[in-house]
Image (cartoon, helix red, strand yellow):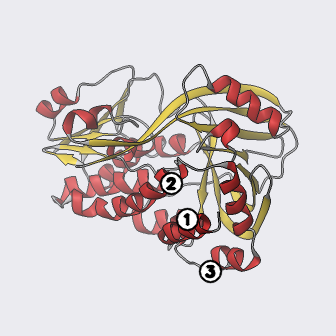
Amino acid sequence: MKVAIIGAGVSGLCCAYILEKLGVQCDIYERKHTIGSLYSFGELLLQIVHRPHKDPLKFMESQFRISIIPLTKVKKIIIKSPKNITVIKGENLGYIVQRGQEQESVENQLAKRINAKINFNINADYKELAKSYDYVVVATGNSMIAKQLTEVENIVSSRIKGGIALGDFEPHTVYLWLNTMYARSGFAYLVPLSQNKASIILVATYTQKEEIENMWQTFLYQEKLNYEMIETFETELDISITDRHQIDNIYLIGNAGGFLGPFLGFGLLNAVESAVYSAESIKHGEDYEKKVKKITDKVDKLVDFRKMMDSIKNEDYDRIVKMIGNPIVKRVMYKTNLDVIKYLHFLAKITNKTQ
């Protein structure tokens, strides 16, 4: 049995890792000259987003045999809207992981554990690979191939501007900003990579390329982020959902399969999960669609909430942040293992009624 994997990002590398553990040969094709993202950034794995799993990294290790070493734990989250601030504290609210080209990045951690050949600088044709391999796994990080194979619904389009800042940072403290002035229905966040280095990211929804620089400067000025930026990057991200995830001998995983969360756009756990399910399905002849339903159910719960956010105003953000700061709400959200995502629609309705 031979498997071709298109894409050497997190999901593609995870799939290769599991396939090798199952004794299946695979080749990886990557259109760039290196694995993963060309730019470095910090990603959040928040415990509240991945409930009922109390610890997303321990869940990955115990359920999927994927061990990821984080940069640090998150012990404080500061959420800011234009007029309100809420501070959440806890011993383990989640993790910060490194993404990109750094040695400790998730991509490099995974790449060191596989033996599969990675063919760089090749823009692989999935149709041709499907003829010469038993299975093809699409892990390209976008929906371009999926749109040729099945129905794809675009949920949200964003432009992302970010960079690495030098300064004095609290290693366990994360900042999240909600402001339509510079992010529309998106958000911005800061995660420390060390005591003197942090990743600052702006995710602005429905934004044209020529607009993002002005929105980025507005964000930095508005939030008084006067740090020295040693590198910056700009990219675009479309979050979609797909009707099917296996078409003949072709499997769609990660963002290529529509598994990215439409709420905040973080998708590390879903990428790993879909990669593992595809490898297991290939090896054991299992129903991939049935296995990934666990992921699509989670994503579907957030689609309507994302659509509600697309019409949100700053006054709504102020109410939401104030509500999250309520001691009773805060206790329920962060001192219990309540599946908050499951009740987001309910919370949104309460917020709307108070307007």
Q: Which x, y percent locates residue 223?
A: 81, 40
Q: Secondary structure at mark 3?
A: loop
Q: Are marks 1 and 2 in contact (CB under 8 Å)?
A: yes
Quick one: label 3, few (<14), some, or many (20+) residues within 10 Å? few
Q: Quadrant of the C terminus?
A: bottom right
Q: Is residue 54 left or right of residue 34?
A: right
Q: Is residue 197 left or right of residue 40?
A: right
Q: Secondary structure at mark 1?
A: helix
To which residue does mark 3 refer?
Answer: 336
Q: Which x, y percent locates residue 109?
A: 53, 45
Residue at image coords 62%, 23%: 211
- Distance from Cα at disc 3 to Cα at disc 2: 26 Å
Q: Which x, y percent locates residue 277?
A: 30, 57
Task: Indicate which disc residue 308 carries.
Answer: 2
Q: What's the residue type where badge 1 is placed?
A: Ala
Out of 20 and 96, give the one closest to the viewer. 96
Of the image marks 3 and 1, the number of the one nearer the N terminus: 3
